[in-house]
Image (tube, coloured by chain):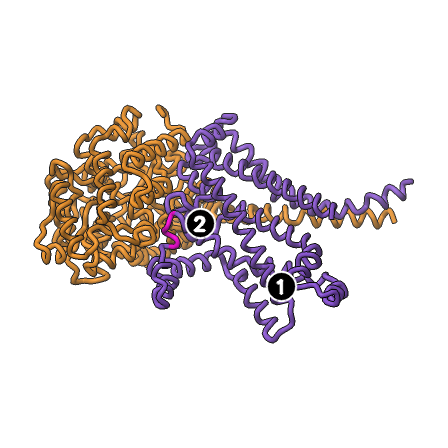
């Protein structure tokens, strides 16, 4: 009886330990995986004395990107080209845009299997999470804006440049609607308000917002940031040092008062709170809406919907008519410091950023090139040509997301935009909330000076 | 004496495996979460420093957004639980009768719970959008006055999400209550029929007391489920428009944008405390009522 009880207890204890050990078992299999490269390294070492051996075992590299980023430049075809050349495989993981940052952060902090990914330095523990990539060939080929954007605060480079065109933001409009109404691109807000009134009187929607896809509303904010940077190029330094608050930036407050007025005067679409990015594109291409505030990445999407669409661009008008657009730095592509295949990942990114592939990318998705040795002006649509002309005149300022050290409280800003556009808060309340939410994020992120 | 001791305690041995699993997979992560909430842990840096109640101070001094999310969570939980229980009760009373198609209707009402939450959210996003199926139907039948931006309206969005969740979960409540209705003695009902009791009298004085325990259980479980609701809300509205459908769970997810781990951990600890307190209160009152009856 005693023996039977002991046996029963032993079996039960073992049964309870099985789930625990199965968790350890997955670590054991990781250890076994890690052991494999060591074995192959050992094999390589013994063979080095005979002849140099390049590891020929094909590997699979994970490539994480926001879903929308994979629509540009034929990037998937370029990756297939590299796979054919090297025999390695790339596991492309497309993540929904608004979940991308959180998912990548979670994977990195959880030690997940991640090799190549996009992002922004401010979202990561750069020296500890990203592989340093200084001294690569692309540095001499990038223009100043792009090169500076890749340098971290310690002066080193931790990112390859994506061949994606440098981003800019402003008002994209249906030229046919303007022509039919005898309108021209406005320069001042007074002119802009007259244009909006005329469009409304014609029965069309002057400005189309797509609040269901909250990130689209923030493209208006990017355009506003282009103006404030143009008015005072030092504004970002002042904000980063907490020397000025958002409510103390006159150009910023002015633009949101304008937005509040547009909402009150009925210049915005009625269904803006449930309208999607797709509906926004359809509205402007069809001419049901005249203007959208967007980034230049929207242009190829519009032409996919209608190759005959006439889409043009003007910067978000300012009070005094001075033009300024934000220009983003180069889109950054990282290699995780814990990547199991750093050399293969570097080879992939070198390939994607070499002149031939970058030229191909930009010819498919033309825009302001980050490279000095690539010019695709002849492939640009009217809107992109207008943007390039403004860039050529030097009327550009830093993109807010590149310049501001405080992480964007994305959901709070989107919520505040929805409240402003729905008329539930005033422009002053929006500006106050905007400042408060960034201050809160700065405190949570323990940024010095806040 | 030894024999008696062993007889008394040997069932405890059978609890050891489940206690181990519970400790490893439930208690340990909860304790880790509590510890993280007292630190400045962040996914952007590897160092961790103990900061005491800093995260909690920041949470409670952070304007009204967190309190709005708590209020919305309670609103969601209570209305959702009431909706599921009342509709479940009505459906159970109907389907407790014998008629043709009874079993088919039971399966139909239970079916929505089998659908994945994300799929339900995507489908209802289409149905409830401004130019979606519901508004199209209302216009087609001449009810233009009822056309609304169901998920875009600050006043209606929360009720729209609750309605969808009730549609999904009412079948589960119906099944629970239907099972309880089988326990109502038929002889008592027959006696009341002989005595000339009407339908309402029979329900309130005979049926309801018998199924009260199950109704309380349905309410309790629905409220607890509502207090931690996340997926249906996040998938349908992401807490918007503005903060109209912001609940504690969505507030927690959004707080991760700063990169901090400690701050979201603090929110999850507060949510855990709120849910535990509410569950204990409801359990206390329902047990007291049952023991009195």
Indicate the chain on which mark 2 is placed. Answer: B
- Residue drawn 69% across and 59% down? B207
For this orientation, the residue located farthest to the right is B1
Report the residue marked by disc 1: B93
Q: Is residue A251 above or below residue A371?
A: above
Dot 2: what SS?
helix
Dot 1 and dot 2 residues touching (CB under 8 Å): no
Residue B141 left/right relative to A10: left
- Depth order, front residue of B23/B233: B233
Residue B144 in picture, x, y percent from top left: 34, 61
Label of residue B179 in the image: none
For this orientation, the residue located farthest to the bottom is B100
Residue A13 in picture, x, y percent from top left: 73, 46
Q: The chain drawn orange is chain what?
A: A
Tell me if residue A51 can be seen: no
Range of magenta residues: B150-154
Mark 1 and mark 2: Cα distance apart in space: 28 Å
- Residue drawn 47% across and 34% down? B263
- Residue drawn 64% across and 59% down? B177
Say yes or no: labels 1 and 2 on the same chain. yes
Report the residue marked by disc 2: B158
Indicate the chain on which mark 1 is placed. Answer: B
Quadrant for the C terminus of chain A, please. Answer: top left
- Crowdedness near tag 2: few (<14), some (14–19) or many (≥20) residues, C-alpha within 10 Å: many
Q: The chain drawn purple is chain what?
A: B
Residue B112 in picture, x, y percent from top left: 52, 62
Foreground disc of the pair 1, 2: 1
Residue A124 left/right relative to A318: right
Total labels drawn: 2
Mark 1 / mark 2, whichever is N-terminal: 1
Dot 1: what SS?
helix
């Amino acid at each position: 009886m005693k023996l039977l009880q002991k046996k029963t207890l032993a079996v039960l204890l073992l049964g309870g330990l099985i789930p625990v050990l199965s968790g350890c078992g997955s670590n054991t299999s990781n250890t076994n995986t890690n052991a494999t490269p060591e074995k192959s390294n050992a094999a390589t070492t013994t063979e080095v004395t005979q002849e140099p051996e390049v590891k020929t075992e094909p590997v699979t590299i994970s490539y994480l990107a926001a879903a929308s980023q994979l629509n540009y430049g034929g990037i998937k075809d370029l990756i297939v080209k590299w796979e054919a050349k090297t025999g390695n495989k790339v596991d492309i993981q497309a993540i929904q845009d608004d979940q991308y940052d959180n998912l990548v952060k979670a994977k990195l902090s959880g030690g997940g299997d991640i090799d190549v990914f996009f992002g922004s330095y401010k979202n990561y523990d750069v020296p500890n999470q990203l592989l340093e990539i200084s001294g690569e060939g692309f540095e001499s080929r990038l223009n100043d804006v792009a090169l500076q954007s890749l340098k971290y605060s310690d002066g080193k480079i931790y990112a390859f440049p994506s061949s994606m065109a440098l981003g800019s933001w402003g008002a994209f409009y249906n030229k046919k609607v303007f022509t039919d109404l005898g309108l021209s691109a406005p320069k001042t807000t007074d002119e802009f308000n007259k244009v909006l009134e005329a469009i409304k009187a014609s029965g069309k929607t002057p400005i189309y917002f797509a609040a269901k896809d909250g990130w689209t509303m923030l493209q208006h904010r990017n355009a506003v940031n282009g103006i404030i940077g143009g008015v005072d190029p030092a504004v970002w330094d002042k904000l980063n040092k907490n020397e000025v608050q958002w409510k103390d930036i006159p150009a910023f407050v002015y633009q949101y008062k304008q937005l509040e007025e547009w909402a009150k005067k009925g210049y915005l679409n009625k269904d803006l709170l449930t309208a999607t990015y797709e509906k926004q594109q359809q509205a402007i291409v069809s001419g049901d809406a005249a203007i959208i505030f967007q980034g230049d990445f929207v242009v190829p999407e519009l032409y996919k919907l209608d190759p005959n669409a006439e889409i043009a661009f003007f910067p978000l008008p300012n009070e005094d008519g001075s033009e300024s657009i934000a220009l983003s730095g180069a889109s950054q592509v990282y290699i995780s410091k814990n990547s199991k295949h750093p050399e293969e990942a570097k080879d992939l990114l070198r390939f994607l950023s070499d002149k031939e592939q970058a030229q191909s990318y930009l010819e498919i998705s033309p825009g302001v090139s980050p490279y000095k040795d690539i010019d695709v002006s002849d492939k640009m649509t009217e809107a992109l040509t207008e943007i390039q002309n403004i860039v050529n005149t030097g009327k550009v300022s830093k993109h807010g997301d590149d310049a501001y050290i405080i992480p964007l409280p994305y959901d709070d800003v989107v919520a505040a935009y929805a409240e402003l556009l729905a008329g539930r808060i005033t422009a002053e309340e929006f500006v106050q909330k905007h400042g408060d939410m960034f201050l809160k994020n700065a405190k949570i992120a323990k940024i010095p000076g806040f | 004496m030894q024999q008696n001791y062993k007889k008394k305690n040997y069932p405890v041995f059978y609890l050891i495996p489940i206690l181990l699993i519970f400790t490893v997979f439930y208690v340990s992560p909860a304790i880790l979460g509590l510890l993280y909430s007292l630190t400045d842990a962040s996914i952007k840096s590897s160092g961790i420093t103990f900061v005491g109640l800093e995260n909690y101070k920041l949470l409670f001094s952070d304007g009204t957004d967190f309190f709005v999310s708590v209020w919305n969570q309670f609103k969601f939980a209570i209305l959702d639980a009431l909706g599921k229980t009342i509709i479940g009760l009505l459906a159970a009373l109907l389907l407790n009768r014998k008629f043709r198609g009874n079993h088919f209707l039971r399966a139909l009402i239970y079916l929505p719970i089998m659908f994945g939450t994300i799929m339900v959210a995507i489908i209802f996003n289409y149905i409830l959008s401004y130019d979606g199926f519901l508004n199209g139907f209302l216009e087609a039948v001449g009810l233009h006055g009822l056309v609304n931006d169901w998920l875009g309206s600050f006043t209606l969005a929360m009720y729209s999400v609750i309605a969808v969740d009730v549609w999904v979960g009412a079948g589960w409540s119906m099944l629970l209550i239907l099972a309880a209705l089988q326990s109502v003695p038929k002889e008592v009902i027959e006696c009341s029929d002989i005595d000339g009791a009407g339908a309402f009298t029979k329900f309130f004085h005979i049926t309801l007391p018998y199924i009260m325990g199950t109704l309380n259980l349905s309410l309790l479980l629905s409220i607890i489920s509502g207090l931690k609701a996340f997926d249906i809300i996040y998938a349908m509205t992401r807490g918007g428009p503005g903060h109209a459908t912001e609940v504690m769970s969505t507030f927690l997810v959004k707080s991760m944008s700063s990169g901090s781990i400690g701050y979201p951990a603090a929110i999850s600890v507060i949510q855990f405390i709120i849910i535990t307190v509410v569950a204990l209160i409801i359990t206390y009152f329902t047990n007291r009522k049952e023991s009195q009856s």
